Image (cartoon, grey):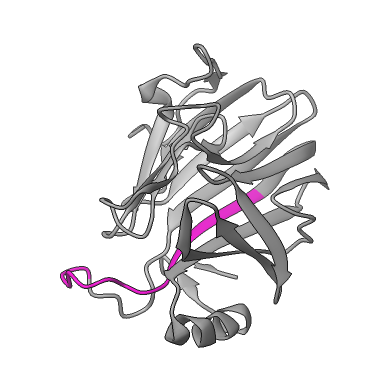
Amino acid sequence: MLDLDPPFRPVRHLEGYLALEDLGLIGDGTTAALVGLDGSIPWLCLPRFDSDPLLCGLLDHERGGHFTLTVDDLREARQFYEPDTAVLVTELRGPTGLVRITDALALRTGADLSDDAGSGRGELVRSAVVRAGTVRLRTELEPRGGGQARALYNGLEVRVSRRPALRLHLRSNRPLAGLRTTHDLQEGDRLDLVLSWWPWNRRSASASATCATGRSTYCARYTF
């Protein structure tokens, strides 16, 4: 993972699970996620490390939940970190093209990492760019225990059956038909996804309107 130019290797699953060495870690000081070599996120606890997991496919690939961004008929892949950052890059190669996925848990401008208080709204940023050829990119957000989505602002509001107090908002630079969507992309095209969360209360209800129209800086590098 520390190699800045690792070789591509086949993506293998054993009884539905990736090997532990095929999982990369991203975090924001409050929580962390594991990103698989296949473009899946099989582990994420929200809003904190010690919270009930939203995604738990690491332990139960059939019912635990995942957030997958991958290409059809994936052949091989590689992972590495952007130098001196917690920004993880996963490159996926299919039979017709190559896509680069950049994953990060966002640090908001002015965030105090020494503060033990909750940060309010958190965000997971997933950005895919087609580097060569054409790809069919498949996105699937399946919370643990299932979830329902409805159109909200420029994305989807996601309600999680097991976590009624947790508010999720999924937005993208491309139309989202639901929690499962496919996009046919060619070289140079990109797909940006941002999953935001916050505990439900009156204050966060008004904040949800702001997050859809405001601009946020992600990891001092990515702005959507």
Relative to 130, is 213 on the left or the right? left
Q: Which residues are magenta?
A: 113-128
The quarter of the displayed image where residue 186 is located: top right
Q: Please state which of residues 159 and 43 is positioned toward the viewer in this rendering.
A: 159
Q: Is residue 120 inside the magenta stretch?
A: yes
Q: Please state which of residues 74 and 146 is positioned toward the viewer in this rendering.
A: 146
Query: Which residue is rendered at x = 31% and y = 72% of the image?
Result: 119
Percent position (x, y) of residue 3? 37, 32
Give the residue furthest to the top.
14
The quarter of the displayed image where residue 190 is located: bottom right
Relative to 9, is 183 on the left or the right? right
Query: Which residue is rendered at x = 54% and y = 46% of the image?
Result: 143
Query: Which residue is rendered at x = 47% and y = 36% of the image?
Result: 42
Relative to 84, is 199 on the left or the right? right
Percent position (x, y) of residue 23? 41, 31
Q: Is residue 110 inside the magenta stretch?
A: no
Which quadrant is the C terminus positioned in?
A: bottom right
